Amino acid sequence: MMPISPLRPQLSEASAPLTHDVEVIDERGRRSVIAIPAERPLTVYVDKRELVTLMTLGGAPEALILGYLRNQRLVKSIAEIESVQVDWSVDSVAVVTRNGIADVEERTSKKVVTTGCGQGSVFGGLMDEIDQIALPPEARLRQSVVYKIVDIIRTQHSIYKQAGSVHGCALFTSQGELLYFFEDVGRHNAVDAIAGRMWLDDVAGGDKVFYTTGRLTSEMVMKGAQMGIPFLLSRSGTTQMGHMVAERVGMSLLSRCSGKHFLLLTGHERLEFEPQLLAAAG
C-alpha cells in the first residue's frame, strides 16, 4: 500500500447516536420500548456554498461527505480538500477546499434524482465518463469466497438486526476478509461512506469485492466502478439499467446472494466455480 497523502484533510469526529428508543403498543395492548434507526438531515456547504442536504444515520458523516464529493466527481483527489467539519447543533457540514471547485455552479446545476432511498442523487452526466472506466480483467473470485462473504454478512452485528429499516454496505478482499462495513438510511450513503474511507486509507479497489443489502441500480453499479471494484454482490436484485452499466464497464454482478444461492448476471469469466461445494452440501 502506498503511503497516505500528507495533505490529508482535517476532519471533525462527529459520529451521532445511531438509534432512538420509542415506546410502542402491540396488537395485544402491551407496551414496550424498541430501538428505531436515527435519521437526521445534514446540509453540505462547500466553500460556504450550499450544495445538498443528505438524510443520514450520522454514524460516519465525514467519510460520507468525502465519498459523496468523490462519487459526484466534484473533486478528483482527497488532497484538494482542506477540511470537513460536521456540526450537529445546526445539522450541517462545512467543507473547505484548497483551491475551490472549478465551474461548481454549472456542474451542480443539473441534478438527476435516482431510484432508491436515502436521498440518493447524482449530478448530470452520470454516463459521460463510463467508457473511461477500465476494471481489471485478470481479477478472479472463487465461489467459496462468495459463500464466505454471505456468511460474514449474515453474522455481522448491525443496526438492521437491532432496529431494521437501514441498508448496509461492506468492502471485502478477494479472499473474503472484511475491511469496512457501514450502515445508513440509504444504500447510497453507505456506499459513499466506504468510498470516503477508501480514500482516507489509500485503499485501491481492483482486488476488492463490494457487498450491498440494497438493489443493484445503475448508480450503485456506477459508484462501484468509479471506485475501481470489479465485483458487486447483493442479497437483493438488480435493475435493467444496473445490468446494462455492469456489462458496459465489465463488472461481475451477483444478485440474490443468500445461503448457497446466487445469480451471476455479468462478468461470468471472473467467477471460479467450485462444484464440489454444492455436492458436499448434498
Image (cartoon, rainbow, N blue to C red):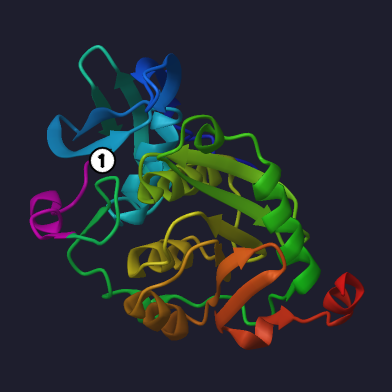
**Vertical placement of residue 115 versus 184, above or below:** below
Label 1 SS:
loop
**Position of 269 compared to 196: left or right?**
right
Magenta stretch in the rendered image: 100-112
- Where residue 171 appears, as percent x and y from the top left, is 60, 52
Q: Position of residue 244 (x, y in %)?
A: 38, 83
Residue in front for this viewpoint, 17 or 279: 279
- The residue sitting at 45% across, 69% down in the picture is 237
Amino acid residing under circle 1: Asn
Q: Name the residue carrying label 1.
A: 99
Picture coordinates of residue 238, whole percent (x, y): 42, 72
Q: Nearer the viewer, residue 32 or 17?
A: 32
In-front residue for pair 30/272? 30
Crowd rating for badge 1 (residues with CA inside 10 Å; few <14, some 14–19, many 20+): few
Write the residue at 23% across / 21% down: 91
The answer to whether residue 13 of the structure is visible from this angle is no
Quarter holding residue 95: top left
Residue for point 27% across, 36% down: 55
